Amino acid sequence: MSSMIRVIIYQWIMSVVFSVIGLLIGYKTGMSFFLGCSAFLIPNLFFASYLSLISNIINYREQAYFFLVGNFVKLVLSVFLLYFFVFIAPENISWFFYLLGLFFSLKGHLLLLFFQRFM
């Protein structure tokens, strides 16, 4: 398993743990946190899988091109999911915890560095 996918799996584990803590506070809090994390981690998982597939391309210019295209698709999918999750359930979204979940998923690798000696 590549290190990118391992980091994303750890980020998923952290997002589920924090979402369960949010669910203990309230349903709206936990779901908002989980949807905020998912809006970033789902495209990241696809992008890491895509990068592992294109790593066999020998031509470095093609690798750079496919990397940029994949990153653009990841960003578009992230923005789409942010909008989509709010569109399907606007009354069940707590904006503070929704954006906090997005922040935790963006900075989840820093928590992994902190807890690395325990894993």
Image (cartoon, helix red, strand yellow):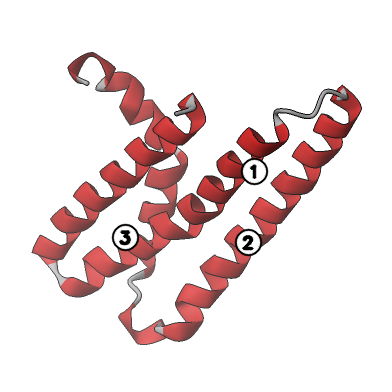
Q: Is residue 97 visible?
A: no
Q: Kindly report the distance in space between the C-alpha atoms of the residues bearing marks 2 and 3.
A: 18 Å
Q: Kindly report the distance in space between the C-alpha atoms of the residues bearing marks 1 and 3.
A: 26 Å
Q: Foreground mark, 2 or 1?
A: 1
**Mark earlier in primary sequence (2, 3):** 3
User: Disc 2 vs disc 3: Cβ atoms closer than 8 Å?
Assistant: no
Q: Can residue 20 be seen in this view?
A: yes
Is 55 positioned to the left or the right of 90 in the image? right
User: Disc 2 vs disc 1: Cβ atoms closer than 8 Å?
Assistant: no
Residue lying at 63% horizontally and 61% vertically, measured from the top left: 77
Instruction: State the quadrant of the C terminus.
Output: top left
Disc 1: which residue: 50
Residue lying at 18% horizontally and 73% vertically, measured from the top left: 27
Q: Is mark 3 on a helix, strand or loop?
A: helix
Q: What element carries label 1?
A: helix
Can you say whether 111 is above or below 23 in the image?
above
Q: Where is residue 35 in the image (x, y as percent from the top left)?
A: 38, 64
Is 55 positioned to the left or the right of 33 in the image? right
Disc 2: which residue: 77
Is disc 1 surrounded by few (<14), some (14 to 19) or many (20+) residues within 10 Å?
some
Instruction: State the quadrant of the N terminus.
Output: top left
Disc 3: which residue: 33
